[in-house]
Image (cartoon, rainbow, N blue to C red):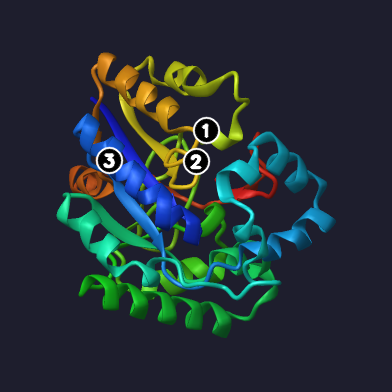
Amino acid sequence: MRILGLKVDVDTYQGMKTGVPRLLSLLAQERLQATFYLSIGPDASGRAVFQLLKNPRFLKKMIKSRAPSLYGFRTALYGTLLPSPAIALSFPSLVKRIMEEGHEVQFHAWDHRRWQDELTAHPESWIREWFHRGIEGFQALTGDRPASFGAPAWLVDDRVIGIVNELSFRYLSCTRAAEPFIHEGTNLLEIPSDLPCFEEMDIEEGEKGIVGKLTQEGLHVLPVHAEVEGGPRGEDFVRLVRAAKSLGYRTSTLGDIHSLLKGENLPRRKFRLELLKGRSVPCAV
């Protein structure tokens, strides 16, 4: 089995406005299908300035990934000096286009920045309201409830797993792990991202560092970001998927992978948090 799942996270207004259309064009050009995890509500990216002050690893990551060229000047002010524009809710016709072109659409976030920076500081009631508003917005855009949740920044805690277990998601993609598993204490199937992101790697490594992890058979999930692969790393992305095809991989949505795994006897595992290479804060692994 050689399957490469494409998981596209849309984190910002600019990523939705310009990154998603470019990615759709690249995917059509290469005849690929992907799963788009959409941030529905406000883009508060400007609040990342507080992380710059508190977390030196975050500043290093912003420099390494050339964040200004990825996100643009206005994005750095949203939620502080500029109002927070809605992300997917601002582009209903674009959400419709994603679905009409055969891609899967799932739920990523209501407010991505606040989840990423403040999740552990908020009570459970805040988490429930965050899901309520996000799912309500998702339904308004698609006419249906999301079948999957992919946590912003791969950050979850026990409260989150308990809540999503109540919300009838068919599968999750909330962790960085080597293989699919069932979340301990639930029947929730996890399809993790096992490959690194472009933004986590040195520019010189590019697609070669990721392709090197595809030399053996297996199921892999590539995390893609609309702001990155739909921006300055678009050509790197194309070379990567072409290299994967040359190795005999077929690309897939995560929904199709879920269909393949439903009857499998997967291990039950408990997530933990770990700081991965190229990240500024710990991820669930």
| Contact? badges 2 and 1 (CB < 8 Å) | yes
Q: Who's the residue at 25% across and 23% down the image?
A: 249
Q: CA distance from mark 2 to mark 3?
A: 15 Å
Q: Label 1, on which residue? A: 198
Mark 2 lies on a secondary structure that is loop
Whichever of labels 1 and 3 marks the residue nearer the N terminus, that label is 3
Q: Position of residue 228 (x, y in %)?
A: 49, 41
Q: Label 2, on which residue? A: 228
Residue 56 vs residue 221, the one in the foreground: 56
Residue neighbourhood size for the residue with mark 2, other residues' Cα within 10 Å, grouped as few (<14), some (14–19), many (≥20): many
Q: Is residue 2 visible?
A: yes
The vertical placement of 150 against 252, above or below, is below
Q: Who's the residue at 43% across and 63% down the image?
A: 185
| Contact? badges 2 and 3 (CB < 8 Å) | no
Q: CA distance from mark 2 to mark 1?
A: 8 Å
Q: Who's the residue at 56% across and 53% down the image?
A: 153
For badge 1, the amino acid type reads Phe
Q: Label 3, on which residue? A: 25
The vertical placement of 70 against 50, above or below, is above
**Quarter of the image where the C terminus is located:** top right
Residue 98 vs residue 170, the one in the foreground: 98
Q: Is residue 183 visible?
A: no
Q: Quadrant of residue 30?
A: top left
In front of the other: label 2 or label 1?
2
Mark 1 lies on a secondary structure that is helix
